[in-house]
Image (cartoon, helix red, strand yellow):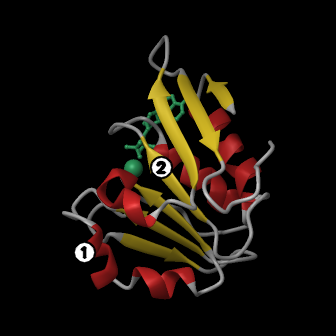
Amino acid sequence: MKYYTCNTDQTEALGAALAEQLAPGDVVAFFGDLGAGKTAFVRGMARGLGILESVTSPTYTVVNEYLSGRMPLFHFDLYRLSGPDDLFDIGWEDYLDRGGICAVEWSERAEELLEDAVRVTIRMADGPDSREITIEAGGNHAAVSL
Ligand code: ADP
Ligand code: MG
């Protein structure tokens, strides 16, 4: 399903709406360039989960954990990883078993591990604040309807 947003708040609202449809163990894989709005979308997901902490980009830490909501949110940024092996090294499989949502920026780095993920692709559209956001249910995931 395709959505268009014309400011950051609308992208966050879409993230919040998606989070409400997710269940423990779900993975959301993000695709899109630097500055597309992936972190903004995850910030909205955090709000949808009732997370109180502020969400910052995990570019340097690879993963940030938010535990104050109705389920945990594990926010990954794989930009600095060289491939799927690196993701195993940081304990990816353990995160999947912790009863939370994994939101993964720069999923291109480990796409083969993310086949069952909900895919969120964000592209610049006309105008600096416009974005085209495509949300697709992957592999084993039930359809998402927002
Ligand atoms: P990414 O994580 O994809 O690199 P960020 O979410 O960190 O991107 O940054 C997106 C930037 O674009 C922010 O400065 C945000 O305010 C701005 N922006 C402008 N319009 C939008 C929009 N419609 N959706 C999301 N972000 C937007
Ligand atoms: Mg980001």
Q: Which mark is residue 30?
A: 2
From the viewer's perspective, tell me whether residue 4 is left or right of residue 113: right
**Residue drawn at point x = 32 percent, y = 74 percent:** 87
Counting residues from the start of the chain, the first of labels 2 and 1 encountered is 2
Q: Looking at numbered disc 1 in the image, what kind of residue is underneath it?
A: Asp
- Work out whether 63 lies above or below 28: below
Dot 2 beta carbon under 8 Å from ligand 1: yes
Q: Between marks 2 and 1, how big is the CA–CA gap?
A: 18 Å
- Work out whether 25 lies above or below 15: below
Seen from the viewer's position, the closer of residues 50 and 45 is 45
Rendered-image quadrant of the N terminus: top right
Seen from the viewer's position, the closer of residues 68 and 76 is 76
From the viewer's perspective, tell me whether residue 38 is left or right of residue 73: left
Q: In the image, residue 41 lies at what x, y percent?
A: 57, 47
| Residue assigned mark 1 | 86
Q: Looking at numbered disc 2 in the image, what kind of residue is underneath it?
A: Phe
- Work out whether 71 lies above or below 31: below
For the question of whether residue 57 can be seen, the reply is: no
The quadrant in which residue 11 appears is top right
Q: In the orientation shown, which residue stands out farthest toward the left?
A: 82
Seen from the viewer's position, the closer of residues 8 and 83 is 83
**Residue drawn at point x = 67 percent, y = 28 percent:** 3
Q: In the image, residue 51 lies at what x, y percent?
A: 67, 69
**Residue drawn at point x = 52 percent, y = 46 percent:** 40
